[in-house]
Amino acid sequence: METDLVTPSRLRVTLMMVVAMTTTSCPVLEERCLSRYVYNSSTQSSRQQFITCSDMGALGQVPAFDISHDDTEMLLFDDNMTIFQLQSHAFAHVKARRLSLRSLSINVVDHMVFGGLEQIIISIDLGDNSISHSPRNRRRSPPPPPLRSQTETSR
């Protein structure tokens, strides 16, 4: 009679299967950011993702996020941190509908910071920051040549 013994290899395979089945598409890479889901009680099938980043201290730019296949209802950075610069496409992978970037001492905002969110974003809160500079893309096309007057063209 053969007994079902739990061997280390069987346990490892079982744990890997459980982890694979419970993994969500959470884009959080930074351990000081927390992702949570709220289920909509009226539809029973819809869930909303909320991400909160806190106690991160002073950062040069927005931390990286992994690609999310779910839309994020809100991405909130609490005011116990500082982000000097909002870099280009900083939130494109998060797919957030609402961004709260209030009181983060932001100084520099890249003009493409919200690139990738054009069809998703509903609101952005940048209140109580120190935004003083918005760099343009340095590779932009040169301005068109000046138009010639009619007297120059008839010569």
Image (cartoon, rainbow, N blue to C red):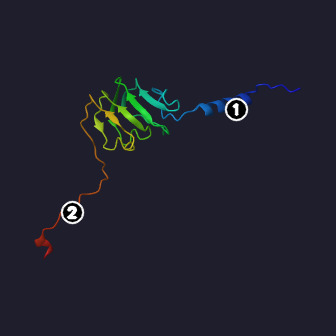
Q: Quadrant of the C terminus?
A: bottom left
Q: Percent position (x, y) of residue 98?
A: 37, 33
Number of marks drawn: 2
The residue that mark 2 highlights is: 145
Q: Residue furthest right?
A: 1
Mark 1 residue element: helix
Q: Residue furthest front?
A: 42
The residue that mark 1 highlights is: 13
Q: Percent position (x, y) of residue 101?
A: 33, 31
Find out whether the residues at labels 1 and 2 contact each other: C-beta distance under 8 Å.
no
Q: Answer left or right for 152 relative to 22.
A: left
Mark 2 residue element: loop
Q: Answer left or right for 5 relative to 56.
A: right
- Would residue 63 be visible to someone looking at this image? yes
Mark number, residue 102: none
Q: Earlier in the sequence, mark 1 or mark 2?
A: 1
Rendered residue at 15%/73% (across/down) = 153
Q: Answer left or right for 36 relative to 8.
A: left
Q: Quadrant of the N terminus?
A: top right
How many other residues sit within 10 Å of disc 2, few (<14), some (14-19) or many (≥20)?
A: few
Rendered residue at 64%/30% (across/down) = 18
Q: Specify the amino acid type for callout 2.
A: Pro
Q: Quadrant of residue 88?
A: top left
Q: Nearer the viewer, residue 10 or 60?
A: 10
Q: Nearer the viewer, residue 20 or 6?
A: 20
Q: Specify the amino acid type for callout 1.
A: Val
Q: Percent position (x, y) of residue 99?
A: 36, 33
Q: Percent position (x, y) of residue 106?
A: 30, 32
Rendered residue at 44%/29% (across/down) = 50
Q: Answer left or right for 34 relative to 18.
A: left
- Would residue 61 be visible to someone looking at this image? no
